[in-house]
Image (cartoon, helix red, strand yellow):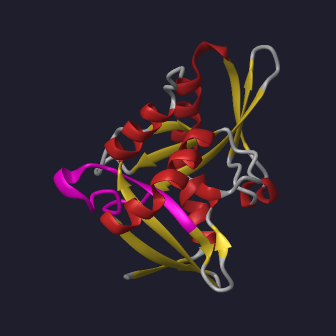
Amino acid sequence: MKMTVHDFNQKLAFSNGANLIDDMKRIQHALGHTCISVEKTDITTDKSGIDYRARLKMGAIVNVDAKRREAGASRWWRNNEPELAIETLSVIEPRKIGWTFSTASDVDYILYSFEPEDSNDYYFIPFALLRKVAYEKGAAWKDTYMEKKQRSNGWESSCIFVPAHIVLREIQKAMLYKSA
């Protein structure tokens, strides 16, 4: 398995540069006319997985975790289709479950976006449904798609990169229940 090395401060600067404005516009657009504001969270909240807080007209707060892929990173699969990162382990040794599988997270949505040269598409995915399908399909995805380790400031994490249409298809299936 190939290893990529990341620096948290560099990744934070990447997220907070021009991408910050793009992310905020995308969140506003995805939530529609009921969204009155989107704010970047403080560093402590960011480290807990919540990058943005959106406020709706009647006061509800929507927590968003932004996952932006750097240029070239989102075209690993066939037909240059964007892939969505499914983090299996946030720390490999000692083993710590990845954000995708965390049932302790207060995140409501995941915003997946890419550098424009890779894709102008973005995905605003309900986190509870993403987590559900990751639990159900994670082993099969690990056998089928690229898994990659990343190193960042002294820890290693691991992600499976799944074509976006596969993840979306499974989420769509997870939303329909038939009565017995």
> In the picture, residue 87 is in which quadrant?
bottom right
Marks counted in the figure total: 0
Relative horizontal placement of residue 180, taking residue 107 as reference (left or right): left
Q: Residue at x 54, y 66 (%)?
A: 88
Q: Nearer the viewer, residue 143 or 146?
A: 143
Query: In the rendering, at what x and y percent does residue 150 appear?
Result: 50, 77
> In the picture, residue 24 is in which quadrant?
top right
Q: Quadrant of the N terminus?
A: bottom left
Classify 155 as above or below 33. below
Query: In the rendering, at what x and y percent does residue 175 appear?
Result: 51, 29
Q: Nearer the viewer, residue 103 or 3?
A: 103
**Residue 148 part of the magenta segment:** no
Q: Residue at x 66, y 15 (%)?
A: 34
**Residue 79 part of the magenta segment:** yes
Relative horizontal placement of residue 173, taking residue 118 as reference (left or right): right
Classify 107 as above or below 95. above
Q: Residue at x 21, y 52 (%)?
A: 80
Classify 76 as above or below 38. below
Residue furthest to the left in view is 79
Relative horizontal placement of residue 47, taking residue 72 as reference (left or right): right
Classify 129 as above or below 75. above
Q: Nearer the viewer, residue 176 or 83?
A: 176
> In the picture, residue 13 is in which quadrant?
bottom right
Query: In the rendering, at what x and y percent does residue 32 appear?
Result: 57, 18
Query: In the rendering, at what x and y percent does residue 16 appear?
Result: 60, 53
Stretch in magenta: 69-88
Q: Residue at x 60, y 42 (%)?
A: 127
